[in-house]
Amino acid sequence: MSHEVEDETTVNESFSITVPAAVRREAGVEAGDKLRWSVDEDGTLSVELIKQQYGAFSQLDPVDIGESTDAADDHDLVAGDY
């Protein structure tokens, strides 16, 4: 982050919050990202931004294992359950 941004928001009756626009912009929060909340023993609340991963496997090359596979049929198989 280039500089410190501080803002506040109100927790509504369903315990939802809105991340203030200035905070979203400065932190780079985008739709699909997650916020990881934690509270330490002193009661200090912390929030960590977990960025959504896109194309994580796009650089992988297929591997020929010598037999045909069908992900739709094979996805529930557990090793040894054939």
Image: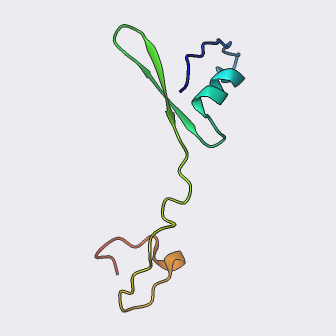
Find residue 74 and report its image quarter: bottom left
Q: Number of numbered discs present? A: 0
Q: Residue at x 66, y 24 (%)?
A: 19
Q: Position of residue 47 (x, y in %)?
A: 49, 24
Q: Which color scheme is applied?
A: rainbow
| The one of 34 and 82 positioned closer to us in this rendering | 34
Residue at x 65% of width, y 28% of height = 24
Q: Residue at x 55, y 37 (%)?
A: 34
Question: In terms of depth relative to the viewer, which is nearer, 37 or 77?
Answer: 37
Regarding residue 3, the answer to whether it shows in the image is yes
Q: At 54% from the left edge and 76% from the top edge, which residue is drawn?
A: 72
Q: In which quarter of the image is residue 18?
A: top right
Q: Where is residue 70 in the image (x, y as percent from the top left)?
A: 50, 82
Q: Where is residue 27 in the image (x, y as percent from the top left)?
A: 58, 29
Q: In this view, does 23 lie above or below 70?
A: above
Q: Please state the horizontal and vertical placement of residue 79, each as a whole percent of the image.
A: 30, 73
Q: Which residue lies furthest to the left in this view?
A: 80
Q: Furthest-front residue in view?
A: 2
Rendered position, 20 above or below 6: below
Quadrant housing the C terminus = bottom left
Q: Is residue 40 left or right of residue 29?
A: left
Relative to 42, residue 4 above or below = below
* Residue 70 versus residue 3 in the image, above or below: below
